[in-house]
């Protein structure tokens, strides 16, 4: 018959029965603790990349965690994974490249480009084999960053993993706050607003253009006819009037 491991519930019931026997005055031998099950999957933080949490526009954040993943037992299947921040209970999801235009900006802050991603190992539909691999875990979501959290402020994040046995594993990482991408976006928005405002003012004060119908049409004969000297028209008319009167 194969050896079956003792579950936590069975262990608790066993200890309860031993306690009752002691209360009844029945001598019992020393109870050996069952050997704990070794971790099948572990994550350790590394320092090959900058561990950061980046504030992005529209209350979006991105977390980059450099880590080493070690699979000690083959056959483990990850069924759920999430990243948690200390500010809200809303989890961050693993980030795919095509999901956001800010992805390239975040990747551009890393030392190595393109980085070695651990995301594909956490989202596989097949069990993991025994392996050890280093890379970065990238997650993103929508979380309001407290205003008192300035650049370089240390922030603790948690990686939550659930396997096919419904075991929930938690791994802690420390990252640093980085608002540089948010400042870049705000500066770009400010420049665009100032440019649009300046263009609108320039159009407001520039001289009004003449329309095709604003000028009075002139015939070619009038255009080449020499102008009368001052008083010439009046003298001619008077002379014609006197001549008519003499007749």
Image: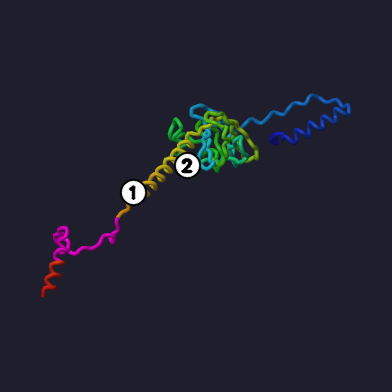
Q: Measuring 25% from the left and 62% from the top, which residue is drawn there? A: 216
Looking at the image, is 28 positioned above or below residue 13? Answer: above
Is residue 63 visible from the viewing direction of this image?
yes
Residue 56 position within the rendered picture, expressed as x and y whole percent measured from the top left: 50, 39
Which residue is outermost to the front? 246
Circle 2: element type: helix
The residue at which mark 2 appears reads as: 97
Q: Which residues are magenta?
A: 210-236
- Colour scheme in the image? rainbow
Q: Main secondary structure of the magenta part?
A: loop
Identified at 52% across, 34% down, the residue is 64
Tell me where residue 76 appears, x and y as whole percent.
Answer: 59, 37
**Residue 104 on the magenta span:** no
Q: Residue furthest right?
A: 24
Say few, some or many: other residues with alpha carbon within 10 Å of mark 2 (under 14 / 14 to 19 / 20 or more).
few
- Pick the front one: 40 or 138: 138
Task: Point out residue 9 in the picture as x, y percentages from the top left corner.
Answer: 74, 36
- On the image, the x and y values in percent for residue 21 come to 85, 29
214 lies left or right of 152: left
Instruction: Name the residue rendered at 52%, 43% in the picture.
Output: 58
Q: Quadrant of residue 232?
A: bottom left
């Amino acid at each position: 018959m194969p050896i079956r491991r003792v579950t936590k519930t069975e262990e608790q019931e066993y200890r309860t029965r031993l306690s009752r026997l002691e209360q009844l005055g029945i001598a019992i031998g020393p109870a050996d603790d069952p050997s704990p099950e070794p971790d099948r999957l572990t994550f350790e933080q590394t320092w090959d990349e900058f561990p950061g949490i980046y504030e992005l526009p529209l209350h979006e954040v991105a977390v980059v965690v450099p880590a080493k993943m070690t699979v000690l037992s083959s056959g483990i299947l990850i069924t759920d994974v999430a990243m948690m921040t200390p500010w809200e209970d809303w989890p961050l999801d693993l980030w795919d490249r095509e999901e956001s235009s800010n992805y390239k900006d975040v990747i551009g802050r890393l030392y190595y480009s393109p980085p070695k991603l651990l995301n594909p190992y956490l989202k596989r539909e097949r069990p993991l084999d025994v392996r050890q691999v280093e890379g970065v875990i990238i997650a993103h979501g929508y979380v309001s960053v407290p205003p008192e959290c300035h650049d370089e402020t240390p922030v603790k994040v948690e990686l939550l993993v659930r396997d096919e046995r419904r075991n929930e594993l938690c791994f802690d990482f420390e990252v640093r706050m980085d608002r540089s991408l948010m400042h870049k976006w705000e500066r770009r928005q400010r420049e665009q607003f100032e440019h649009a405002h300046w263009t609108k003012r320039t159009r407001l004060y520039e001289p009004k253009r003449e329309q095709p119908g604003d000028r009075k049409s002139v015939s070619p004969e009038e255009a080449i006819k020499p102008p009368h000297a001052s008083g010439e028209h009046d003298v001619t008319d008077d002379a014609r009037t006197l001549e008519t009167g003499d007749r």
